[in-house]
Image (cartoon, rainbow, N blue to C red):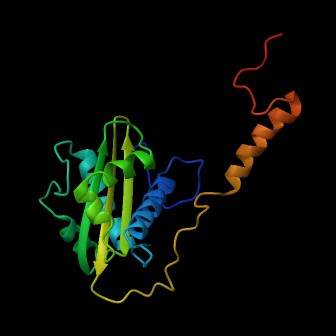
């Protein structure tokens, strides 16, 4: 069972990768605009589902290390099965650790010519990102789509810059504040002072 996955929930009290996945989308947006793209890349649930399927496959089948699934499926096959109509490409990252930072991921893909070409393709205006972690492995898949049909972007909002800010963040800050107000020390020490 994975330690964390993207459950599309903003609850930060339960481990999930939504903030990480949204950071990948934001970084792809930046790469595309640095390449001269004028469109906004939008999250597509069908591509996200295709990415999720491949992440689960790669996480559970250690012999896999790229785009081809254990059943021989390609990124296009998975996107078609998820209901996406159009051309797709995919980037995959496998990190031999429990976690991975979005900076580490974007640097890996940015300096790989094939991955960079996929990320900076202006025609790929739809994206689905999924990631999961186990104790010794993190797998991230981004599926980029060029739909065969016009996309109504007025109904699909871009990512909020404050992606994962909710009441739990206020509680976390409030708990830190109590330590400060009671001891006069901020940030609070990890260990109580010894008298």
Q: Residue at x 34, y 35 (%)?
A: 136
For the C terminus, which image quadrant? top right
Horizontal relation, residue 137 to residue 42: left or right = left
Horizontal relation, residue 178 to residue 82: left or right = right
Q: Quadrant of residue 143?
A: bottom left
Residue 104, image x and y in percent?
40, 45
The vertical placement of 150 against 117, above or below, is below
The vertical placement of 92 against 192, above or below, is below
Residue 172, image x and y in percent?
71, 44
Q: Residue at x 37, y 74 (%)?
A: 126
For the N terminus, which image quadrant? top left
Horizontal relation, residue 119 to residue 66: left or right = right
Q: Quadrant of residue 121?
A: bottom left
Q: Residue at x 44, y 48 (%)?
A: 103
Number of callouts in the render?
0
Q: Quadrant of residue 48?
A: bottom left
The vertical placement of 56 against 100, above or below, is below
Whether residue 1 can be seen here: no
Residue 50, image x and y in percent?
29, 66
Which residue reaches farthest top? 195
Residue 148, image x and y in percent?
27, 86
Q: Residue at x 33, y 70 (%)?
A: 47
Whether residue 176 can be seen here: yes
């Amino acid at each position: 069972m994975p330690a964390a996955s993207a459950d599309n929930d903003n609850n930060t009290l339960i481990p999930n990768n939504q903030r990480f996945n949204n950071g990948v989308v934001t970084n792809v947006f930046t790469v595309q605009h640095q390449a001269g793209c004028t469109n906004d890349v939008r999250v597509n649930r069908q591509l996200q589902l295709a990415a999720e399927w491949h992440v689960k496959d790669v996480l559970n089948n250690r012999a896999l290390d790229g785009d081809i699934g254990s059943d021989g499926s390609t990124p296009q096959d998975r996107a078609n099965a998820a209901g996406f109509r159009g051309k797709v490409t995919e980037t995959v990252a496998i990190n031999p650790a429990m976690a991975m930072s979005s900076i580490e991921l974007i640097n890996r893909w940015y300096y790989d010519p094939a991955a960079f070409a996929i990320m900076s393709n202006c025609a790929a205006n739809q994206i689905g990102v999924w990631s999961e972690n186990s104790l010794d492995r993190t797998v991230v898949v981004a599926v980029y789509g060029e739909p065969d049909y016009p996309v109504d972007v007025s109904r699909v909002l871009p990512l909020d810059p404050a992606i994962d800010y909710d009441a739990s963040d206020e509680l976390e800050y409030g708990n830190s504040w109590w330590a400060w107000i009671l001891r006069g020390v901020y940030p609070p020490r990890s260990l109580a002072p010894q008298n």
